[in-house]
Amino acid sequence: MLYHSLKNHKNLVSFEYAVLKGLAPDGELYIPEHIPKLKPEFFQKLKKSDIYTIALSIIKPYIGKSIPEELIYNIIHETLNFPFPLQKIHDNIHVLELFHGPTLAFKDVGAKFMAGCLSFFSKKKGNDVTVLVATSGDTGGAVAKGFHKKPGIEVIILYPYNGISSLQEKQIASLGDNIFALEIHGSFDDCQNMVKNAFLDKEIQKKYILTSANSINIARWLPQMFYYFLAYRQIIEDSIELIFSVPSGNFGNICAGMMADKMGLPIKFFIASTNINDTIPRFLKYEKYNPISVKKTISNAMDISNPSNFSRIWDFLYKKNIHQLRKKLYSYKFTDEETLAIIEMVWKEHKYMLDPHGAIGYLGLRQYLHKSKNTSNTAIFLETAHPIKFLDHMPYFLRKKIFFPKKLKVFLKKKKKIKKTSLSNDFNVFKNWLLKRK
Ligand SMILES: *Cc1c(COP(=O)(O)O)cnc(C)c1O
């Protein structure tokens, strides 16, 4: 499989090249030249195969000769080393829990997978690689943990001042070693723009072999396809079509799901559930892409107004065909008040504790099912983080009821200092900092 820029289909590059570059030279995202279809045999065996074999079959065609198959298998083995349980909540509504990884966020999978790939490439090249990443919260922790102490790699993480929780900051800024935390006095979009500009800057490029670990990087984006197959594997009935509601921010996760659909996984449609940063719900309604400034919400990992992965859905998967896209993708937005109310209701009625992101996923499903009266499909929302990560935002009287995971207790007990650098929201300040430190 080869990759090219979203806008320029001429220059084809390998998986390795696209992972190391992050973005194509024209500043656009990389996309695969085609989407491989999985064979009927794959689906016949799916429910009986182990998850590593399944994941290998899904991802292998995307990696091609860049990494030996045995090594891909090892990376998968290291990556999928925690459970992904699917649970029924009520009626036909199910939750796929993606928060059992080391930082209690679904981003652990993409981060770990990418760290494995990059470590192999850096060793092969004999050069150090610097990972630049902007985070609205969970990416930073997952990347820091996934890349910590990986030889040949250093990681610089940019995050918005006052934009992430104190636990998230501790996950990013307390590891040290090859992990560097940069607090930016701006929004997540500002952080993301700084990272994008760094990739286009010739002076920075001379000093660093830079790559990104945002969901725009194909090595983080593609392994997210696994979730959708792992959900399907846990459904007992055959020949059933699934509905997925995905709490969406940068639209990497849902875009990976839409790839899984194109590869042959029987998915009826997707619901992109957002908070009030509703660029995509508005786009699907009015066909106008009009990002406005970011608003802070309690589902802060989704406080994004210009979701970079959406162009992979719109330009690449749906070739700018709004009618085709509207058949496969619905999108609804929800407020903080609605989010808090549903967390309370689901706890009271079903004894299930949602986090603010999963709550928005649940709300999306409910809205659709309410409208369509469809109860025959298996409807699944993705629970993308453990509620304990957003304790400060949870309804006050529920806080004591949230299960406290053991690995978090261990992490919090470790008395580690926060080590970070604060920079103003100015690309030149960031650039000087980068050029001076090496
Ligand atoms: C990142 C994140 C999201 C959004 O995922 P995207 O792939 O950026 O759409 C949702 N929930 C949580 C908890 C996250 O960390």
Image (tube, rainbow, N blue to C red):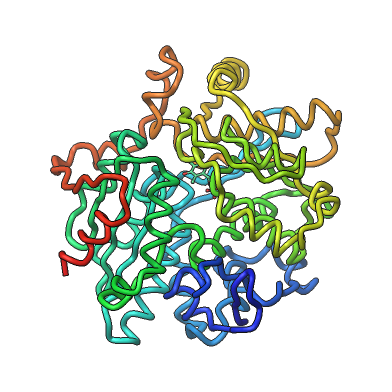
Q: Quadrant of the N terminus?
A: bottom right
Decide which of 312, 219 is in the foreground and name it. 312
Decide which of 262, 100 is in the foreground and name it. 262
Residue 87 makes an appearance in the image: no
* In the image, residue 19 above or below residue 386: below
**Is 369 placed left or right of 234 in the picture?**
right
- The residue at 14%/43% (across/down) is 416
Decide which of 220, 318 is in the foreground and name it. 318
Q: Position of residue 251 (x, y in %)?
A: 59, 50
Q: Position of residue 284 (x, y in %)?
A: 75, 42
Q: Quadrant of residue 415?
A: top left
Residue 214 makes an appearance in the image: yes
The mark tally for this picture is: 0
Q: Quadrant of the C terminus?
A: bottom left
Q: Quadrant of residue 405?
A: top left
- The residue at 62%/36% (across/down) is 278
* In the image, residue 399 above or below residue 8: above
Q: Position of residue 75 (x, y in %)?
A: 44, 71
Q: Position of residue 112 (x, y in %)?
A: 41, 62
**Is 148 placed left or right of 197 in the picture?**
left
- The residue at 78%/47% (across/down) is 269
- The residue at 37%/55% (across/down) is 194
